[in-house]
Amino acid sequence: MKTTKLRLNLLATLCLSTITFYSCSSDDSPAVEELVDSISYTYSDVTKVLDFRPAPGQFVNELPKYEEGDTQEIMNQKALKAISGNKLSMVSLGGFGGYIVMGFDQTIKNVDGRRDFIVLGNAFKNSSEPGIIMVAHDKNKNGKPDEDEWYEIKGSEYSNAKTIHNYEMTFYKPSADLDAKKGDFDNYIEYKNNQGDKGYKPKNRFHDQSYYPLWIKETSLTFKGAKLPNNATDTSGNGTYWILPEYEYGYVDNQVNSHIDAAIDINWAVDKNGKSVQLPGIDFIKVYTAMDQEAGWLGETSTEVSGVIDLHKAKFKVPTR
């Protein structure tokens, strides 16, 4: 998450009461077709957070707030409070691979020809921090994603030659002295990836708490997934003005919540080999940060999640691609 993004966009994103979907048409169809009158995004259908494990980042231990003694279960509950009900805030997933696993009180149905759900993020124009969506169907009906296979939602960059599938990154817990150090410095969080890169993630003057999730006792964290191409560009040439353009569709915290391509079709799900799968519906959604980049003084690119809307439960018919 970029520092200014939270400060300037939190109220704009979460305090508006409605969004409207439009479908821009071809020459032989109506110029603009209004698909829905309005849909509230101050309410979320999430009823369970089964796991919340962010990668190190500048809003970790802040969104949600960690307090000494908090366990994994307590942090799961704090994350749930942030992204459920009708008083939404958000959680930060930190750097690459940081994730949250969410569940619902009823299956989100897969309706042919329609998009089925939206995972709410915190994106706005030229300020996108895409997260990849994984979905699972609770075949054994035990309310847990234990023996259920996860499938990736195939977004617009799935086949991009610059997308790295099976990316792996390990972060190492910093010393107490480094955690306590304030201001801008580069050699903070040590990391390595499976592409042969290693080094350190920086700390910035805007956030001086620990960037490593303090409720996790392990001294290293390893995350695996697909890494999308970097989207950060310094348009000023001197580090003062960064933009992060959105990808076309299929991700979280990518298109603004009001954009039709923030909505997801379950039929976009693919297995680990990239083969399309047919699911009757989904009971669990996992979102993880799919970027590994720093954008100067804005800090790391980190996906934010504010909730999930079941479009069928909300009685909106949003056509698919």
Image (cartoon, rainbow, N blue to C red):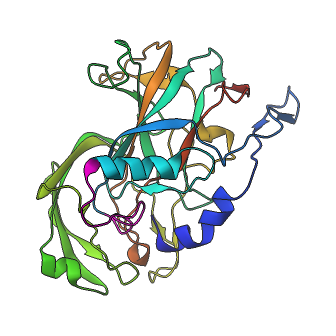
Residue range corresponding to the magenta coloring: 57-72
Q: Tell me if residue 125 comes above or below residue 152 in the rendering.
A: below
- Residue 111 in magenta? no
Residue pictured at 22% horizontal, 82% vertical? 180
Q: Nearer the viewer, residue 170 or 80?
A: 80
Residue pictured at 55% horizontal, 61% vertical? 127
Q: Main secondary structure of the magenta part?
A: loop
Extreme residue toward the front, this view: 69
Image quadrant containing the C terminus: top right
Q: Tell me if residue 121 comes above or below residue 126 in the rendering.
A: above
Residue pictured at 41% horizontal, 70% vertical? 295
175 sits to left or right of 297: left
Q: Tell me if residue 279 comes above or below residue 185 in the rendering.
A: above
Q: Nearer the viewer, residue 317 or 90?
A: 90
Q: Is residue 98 visible?
A: no
Picture quadrant where residue 51 is located? top left
Residue pictured at 45% horizontal, 46% vertical? 80
